[in-house]
Structures are given as structure tokens and as C-alpha cells.
Image (cartoon, rainbow, N blue to C red):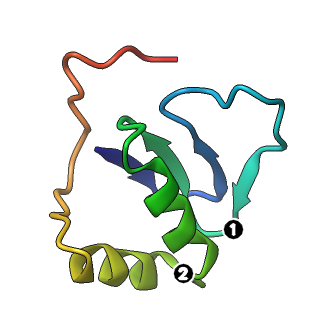
Amino acid sequence: MLGISDEPGIFNFAKPPADEVDPVECEFGTFQCYDVRVESQFLSLLDSMHDLEMFFEALLDQGYNIVAGQPRPGHFARL
């Protein structure tokens, strides 16, 4: 699961990296990843995108569903 806001911001990791890393900034969105297993895939997609619409198209092409509304991670811990 990936929570997305259309406000410029950063990519928030599901699990903070073991090593200290600089924040992954994004000019067209703020992202909260809730699944460490797909984190690298989302980051890779994000790195080659120019806007949120392009990112959404790439997610759909990868077989992900996009649902508008407030994420409800339920069993996930908020960091």
C-alpha cells in the first residue's frame, strides 16, 4: 500500500533504511509506503516520473489499483 498526496514532499519509507540516507524529495507528491516488499519498486518508478499523472499511469501499467480516499492501513504501524 502506498499513500499519496499531491503536495510536493518526500517519500516516507515503510521501514527506515538501516543506513542514514538523505530524504527522497519529490516535486509533485508526498508518499507514504506501507509495504517494505514493494518499496524499491515504487522508488524506481518515482525516479523516472515527471508528474503525478505519469506516476499513476505507471502504477496502473504495473497492475496496481488506485483508490481515492484516506488510506486505512489497519494493521500497519505509523512511523
Secondary structure beneath disc 1?
Answer: loop
User: Residue 23's quadrant in the figure?
Assistant: top right
Image height of 36 relative to 44, above or below: above
Quadrant (top left/top right/bottom left/bottom right) for the N terminus: top left
Image height of 77 relative to 42, above or below: above
Image height of 13 relative to 78, above or below: below
Marks 2 and 1, how far apart in space?
8 Å
Q: Is residue 35 left or right of residue 24?
A: left
* Residue sitting at x 31%, y 83%: 57
Secondary structure beneath disc 2?
Answer: loop
Depth check, front residue: 9 or 48: 48
Image height of 36 relative to 15, above or below: below
Query: Can residue 73 be spotted in the picture?
Result: yes
| Residue pointed to by mark 1 | 27
Q: Position of residue 31 (x, y in %)?
A: 50, 49
How packed mark 2 is, by other alpha carbons closer than 10 Å (few <14, some 14-19, many 20 or more), is some
| Residue pointed to by mark 2 | 51
Q: Position of residue 75 (x, y in %)?
A: 21, 16
User: Residue 77's quadrant in the figure?
Assistant: top left
Depth check, front residue: 13 or 70: 13
User: Residue 78's quadrant in the figure?
Assistant: top left
- Amino acid residing under circle 2: Asp
Query: Can residue 6 be spotted in the picture?
Result: no
- Mark 2 vs 1, N-terminal side: 1
